Image (spheres, rainbow, N blue to C red):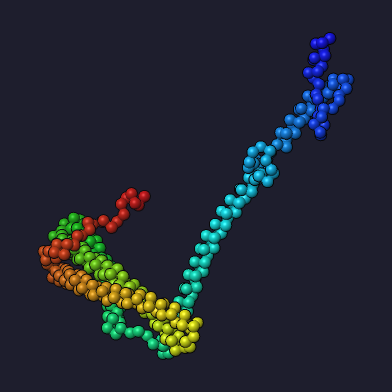
Amino acid sequence: MADSIMSKAATMEIPINSNGDTGTLAEDDSLEQHQWSNTDDISDLQQVMVSGPNLNETSIVSGGYGGPAGGIIPTSTIKGSSNHNTNSSTEEVSRGVAVEKLDSVKKWGINTYKCTKQMFSERFGRGSRTVDLELEAQIDVLRDTKNKYENILRLATALISHFQNMVQTQQALGDTFTDLSQKSPELQDEFGYNAETQKLLCKNGEALLGAINFFVSSVNTLVNKTMEDTLMTIKQYENARLEFDAYRSDLEELSLGPRDAAAMVRIEMAQHEYQIHRDKYERLRSDVTIKLKFLEENKVKVMHKQLLLFHNAISAYFAGNQQQLEQTLIQFNVKLKPPGSDKPSWLEEQ
């Protein structure tokens, strides 16, 4: 009897009301409570699993257990704050880049406007320009020299083309004479003499072609690299001169205007821009002067050697002096390409 009472008491639940007092529970209801308590436990567990805490809404409690609700800081607020700071910094960087680009475009537009205005003023005789008579005379001579040297290159290239055709014809003619000397016993000696002559002319012609090719290559380097580099610096100098005159004219116009506070600020800014472009103009003018001097020295040195090579090679070839022609090539360190070196190999043809 005592054992049954103890087992029944072990399965009973003691309800607690809102005041913390224990409520009365009838003995008959204890068994019924024991039967559905397991079912409620399972449903409560499922509810906890379904409606469990969201990791995105997890809170950080500041203070001890049972502290005030004001000490709870949602982590979503911290995450949103960090994202907001990152976005703000990215927007500031983008805004800074955009402002820099806008300033660059603005400066370019102002500079282009001033230079265009100065150019038209000079063209129609309304504006003044800075002139260095000695330097501009040297620049004109260089451009004229370059045009004449380019004409020499065109003519020399045409001479190579025509002469190469003649050498190939002589080669074919010599092969034909050799073939006929073997097939015509009665004219074997005559065909043989002519074949040897054509082969000798062909050999000397290839030597002359080597000398002319060397001449063309050296002059081409002088014209299209050395002179072109100097002309690029001259182009920069001319642009700097136009910018300098544009800002000089702008400063002169402001100096003739009123002298109030706003005008003085504009004059000071114009004076600063004028000084910058003046320094740039002076620097490039010095660079052009130095390059023209070295170019003239290099041109004389190169052309002296190449003209002497061209003359000696042409004279030796048409005089039939094979030994002098070979000595000329050795003197100027001209190396001939072996016959057939220009033709692609059989691997390249595949």
Observer-nearest of 189 and 117: 117
Which residue sits at x=87%, y=20%?
A: 27
In the rendered image, the quadrant that contains the N terminus is top right
Which residue sits at x=34%, y=51%?
A: 348
Question: Is residue 288 something one can see in this rendering?
Answer: no
Which residue sits at x=67%, y=40%?
A: 67
Question: Is residue 108 something one can see in this rendering?
Answer: yes
Horizontal relation, residue 98 to residue 146: left or right: right
Q: Is residue 17 above or below residue 129?
A: above
Observer-nearest of 275 and 69: 69
Quarter of image, res 209: bottom left
Query: Percent position (x, y) of residue 106?
Result: 50, 73
Observer-nearest of 27 and 137: 27
Query: Percent position (x, y) of residue 86?
Result: 56, 53
Query: Percent position (x, y) of residue 197?
Result: 16, 63
Hey, which residue is sitting farthest top in the picture? 1
Q: Is residue 31 above or below residue 229?
A: above
Horizontal relation, residue 237 to residue 186: left or right: right
Quarter of image, res 297: bottom left
Q: Is residue 95 above or below residue 151?
A: above
Horizontal relation, residue 33 to residue 249: left or right: right
Observer-nearest of 326 and 195: 326
Quarter of image, res 242: bottom left
